[in-house]
C-alpha cells in the first residue's frame, strides 16, 4: 500500500500546490504608445500573467526589459527607472500620483508607457 | 524649387542636415504664407523645445539667436510675424492631453535626429526635468533675462541681394546653401563665414550659379 497510496498522496499535495500557484498569479496589461512600441516589435498591448504577488513598479520595469523588450534597452530604462521622456500611466493616471516606482501592482492593473522622445 | 533632405543628406552626410532643412522649411513657410496672404504664422513649439534651443545657443555661443529664440512673437518689417502659443506648455502636458482626448498623434521621428546636435541638449533637459520639473521654465526664463554687453557685435538686419529675403548678411542663408549645393560644395554653408571664404579661395571657382529659384 505504500506504493500507490504514497504516490497518490504526493499527487494530492501537488494538486494543492498547483491550485495555490494559480490563485496567486497576477494578470495585468502593459501598453505602449508614442513610439515606445517600436522597441517591442510594434506590439502595443501585452497581457501579462505574473507569478506570485508583491510586484512594485520598481520590480516590474526590469522584468519588462528582460522579458518583453526586443531591442535597445537603454531607450527604455535608465538606471532603476524609465528613461527620462517616457511617461508612465497607471490605470490612466500619472504614476507620480500613485508613488512612482513604489506603487504596488494589483490584479487587473493597466500600465501604459508613452514615449515623448521623437520629432525634429 | 524642391529640395529634399534625402538629396542634401547624400551631399553632406548624416550631420548638419538640420541647417539645410530648417532654413529651407522656414523660408517655404514664410513664402507660402505670403502667397495665401496670411496675417500670422503660428508654430507648435513647446516649452521643452524652447528650453533645448536656449541650451543649444548657449553651448554654441550663438548670442544672436539666443536673444530671438525666447521671444513669443517675432516679426519685422515686411515679414509675416510668427508666434509660439505653446511656449510655456510642457511636452508632457501636450502628450497627456493628446492621450486623454484621443487625438491623432504623429510619433514619427526625423531620420537624421539621432545625429543632430539638439539631441545633446534634449538629453540634458530631460535629465533636469526628472530632478526638478520646474527647471524647464527656469531655463526659458534665464534665456529671456540674459542681457548682452553693449560692446558685443550683433548682426544687423538687411535683405538678401539675390532673393530679397530677410538676412543678416548680403546673401541670405538659403542662397548660400543653394550656391553650395549647386557647386557641389555644400560645406560652404556650414560653419563660419571666414571658413567659407577660405574654401572659395582655395578652389578659385568662378561661374555663376542658380539662386534664381526663389
Image (cartoon, coloured by chain):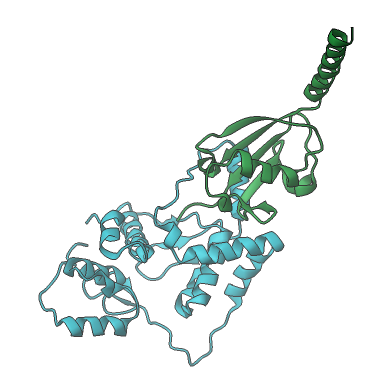
Chain colours: A green, B cyan
Looking at the picture, does residue B136 appear above or below residue A92?
below
What count of labels does the image hold? 0
Q: Quadrant of the N terminus of chain B?
A: bottom left
Identify the residue at horizontal 51%, vertical 76% (top origin).
B59
**Image coords of residue B77 (percent x, y):** 37, 71
Quadrant of residue B175 within the rendered picture: bottom left
Q: Seen in the image, is A84 located left or right of residue A51?
A: left
Q: Seen in the image, is B210 located left or right of residue B135?
A: left
Kindly tell me whether residue A100 is visible in this rendering. no
Residue lying farthest to the right in this orientation: A1
Q: Quadrant of the C terminus of chain B?
A: bottom left
**Image coords of residue A112 (percent x, y):** 65, 39
Q: Seen in the image, is B173 located left or right of residue B148?
A: left
Quadrant of residue B184 within the rendered picture: bottom left
Looking at the picture, does residue A109 appear above or below residue B114?
above
Identify the residue at horizontal 61%, vertical 55% (top origin).
B90
Residue lying farthest to the left in this orientation: B207
Residue lying farthest to the front in this orientation: A2
Kindly tell me whether residue A21 is visible in this rendering. yes
Work out whether residue A69 or residue B211 is closer to the camera in this orientation and state it: A69
Work out whether residue A96 or residue A75 is closer to the camera in this orientation and state it: A75
**Image coords of residue B2 (percent x, y):** 24, 54
Identify the residue at horizontal 45%, vertical 50% (top origin).
B109
Amino acid at each position: 500500500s505504500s506504493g500507490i497510496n504514497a504516490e497518490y498522496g504526493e499527487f494530492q499535495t501537488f494538486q494543492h500546490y498547483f491550485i495555490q500557484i494559480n490563485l496567486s498569479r497576477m494578470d495585468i496589461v502593459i501598453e505602449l504608445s508614442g513610439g515606445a512600441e517600436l522597441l517591442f516589435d510594434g506590439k502595443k498591448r501585452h497581457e501579462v500573467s505574473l507569478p506570485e504577488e508583491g510586484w512594485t513598479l520598481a520590480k516590474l520595469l526590469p522584468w519588462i526589459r528582460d522579458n518583453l523588450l526586443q531591442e535597445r534597452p537603454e531607450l527604455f530604462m535608465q538606471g532603476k527607472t524609465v528613461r527620462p521622456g517616457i511617461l508612465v500611466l497607471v490605470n490612466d493616471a500619472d504614476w507620480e500620483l500613485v508613488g512612482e516606482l513604489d506603487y504596488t501592482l494589483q490584479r487587473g492593473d493597466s500600465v501604459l508607457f508613452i514615449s515623448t522622445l521623437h520629432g525634429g | 524649387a524642391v529640395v529634399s533632405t534625402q538629396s542634401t543628406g547624400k551631399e553632406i552626410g548624416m550631420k548638419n542636415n538640420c541647417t539645410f532643412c530648417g532654413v529651407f522649411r522656414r523660408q517655404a513657410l514664410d513664402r507660402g504664407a505670403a502667397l495665401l496672404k496670411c496675417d500670422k504664422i503660428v508654430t507648435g513649439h513647446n516649452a521643452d523645445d524652447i528650453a533645448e534651443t536656449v541650451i543649444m545657443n548657449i553651448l554654441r555661443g550663438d548670442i544672436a539667436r539666443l536673444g530671438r529664440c525666447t521671444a513669443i512673437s517675432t516679426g519685422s518689417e515686411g515679414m509675416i510675424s510668427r508666434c509660439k502659443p505653446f511656449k510655456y506648455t510642457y511636452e508632457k502636458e501636450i502628450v497627456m492631453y493628446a492621450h486623454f482626448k484621443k487625438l491623432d498623434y504623429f510619433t514619427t521621428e526625423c531620420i537624421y535626429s539621432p545625429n543632430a546636435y539638439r539631441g545633446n541638449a534634449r538629453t540634458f533637459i530631460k535629465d533636469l526635468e526628472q530632478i526638478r520639473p520646474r527647471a524647464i521654465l527656469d531655463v526659458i526664463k534665464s534665456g529671456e533675462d540674459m542681457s548682452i554687453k553693449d560692446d558685443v557685435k550683433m548682426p544687423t538686419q538687411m535683405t538678401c541681394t539675390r532673393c530679397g529675403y530677410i538676412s543678416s548678411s548680403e546673401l541670405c542663408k538659403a542662397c548660400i546653401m543653394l550656391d553650395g549645393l549647386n557647386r557641389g560644395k555644400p560645406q560652404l554653408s556650414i560653419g563660419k563665414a571666414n571658413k567659407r571664404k577660405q574654401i572659395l579661395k582655395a578652389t578659385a571657382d568662378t561661374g555663376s550659379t542658380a539662386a534664381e529659384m526663389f
